[in-house]
Amino acid sequence: MSITVPAIFVLCGLVLLFFGGEGLVRGSSALALRLGLTPLVVGLTVVAFGTSAPEMVVSVQATLAGQGAVAIGNVIGSNSLNIGLILALTALIYPLKVQLQVLRIDTPIMVGASLVAAWMLSDLAIGRVEGGILFAGIIAYTAFTVLYANKMKLSAEVEAEFAEAVPAPHGSIWRDLLFILVGLGLLAAGSHFLVDGATRLARGFGISEAIIGLTIVALGTSMPELVTCVVAACKKEPDIALGNIIGSNIFNVLSILGAAALIRPMTGEGIRMTDLYVAIAFAVALVPVLWSGRILQRWEGGLLLVGYIVYVATLWPE
């Protein structure tokens, strides 16, 4: 079987997902500011959730196509990749120290959500009731974040950081809506190409759909997080980078797994419990750093990166 067409499908899907995610984040952030939300709330919710939009669309698309392993693998793989690769690279560029108190609360929530998901997936299946519980969790988390963030007293440094990362809207509200609609359209098209191409590649090379979901699909859907975090690191804005990763990981588990399972119960044939444990381990690794107020140093970022590379290397021999 020729890999040319599937490879082109994957490449086209990645490009469309990237630009779709960027358009959705830009339009929805501007619209949220117009509606009166603060830059902090927008940064912790709209931006963090918006960068996970590719994961959402791809997982839903895979679920509808009956490819539960791709959908589940995408979520688990993205969460491991967000910390083991993206946050690690961010720390290598600029050591990260969290100043925003809410992130110290969100980190245990991220660990807790990962543990709940692992428990639900212990039989490698997730049904509508479990999906409903997860989705209720994202609603509660979002409400908590908005209320807590609105009550917080920010330092001038943190306030300036989020104000710069979430710039004031320009033009009319119709421009924002156009960005959102075009972004959603590109995400829908990109998810179709990526899931179709990745599935064909898996079959062509005799690789399981689970491995494709955990690696290639996870990497492709995490590109918005990568760009956001690298830019934040270059601008020396650690709270933006950490907030994006932590918020995205919580959204991935609660909203994406929840929504996909509500649409159609899934089975994750080929997903190993080890894959779930690795995602939990990466989440747990952030707790002592953020709660102690220490800086995530470059050498610690390097250790996370080495750990992720070793994990990915264990996938392919199968």
Image: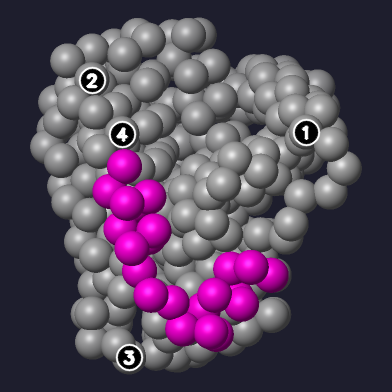
Q: Is residue 21 visible?
A: no
> On the image, numbered disc 3 is attached to which residue?
294
> Which image quadrant is residue 1 in?
top right
> On the image, numbered disc 4 is attached to which residue?
139
> On the image, numbered disc 1 is attached to which residue?
173
Q: At x 39% / y 58%, what residue is drawn?
A: 150
Q: Nearer the viewer, mark 2 or mark 1?
A: 1
> On the image, numbered disc 2 is attached to which residue?
132
Please say if 82 is above or below 127.
below
Of labels 1 and 3, earlier in sequence is 1
Q: What stretch of residues is rendered in magenta?
A: 143-164
Q: At x 43% / y 77%, what residue is drawn?
A: 154
Q: Is residue 257 visible?
A: yes
Q: Which amino acid, mark 4?
A: Ile
The prevailing secondary structure element of the residues shown in magenta is helix
Q: At x 18% / y 26%, what residue is drawn?
A: 133
Of labels 2 and 4, earlier in sequence is 2
Asked if the stretch drawn in magenta spans residue 219, the answer is no
**Mark 4 element type:** helix
**Mark 2 element type:** helix
Question: Label 4, label 3: how many angstroms apart (C-alpha)?
Answer: 31 Å
Across and down, in percent, residue 286 comes to 30, 72
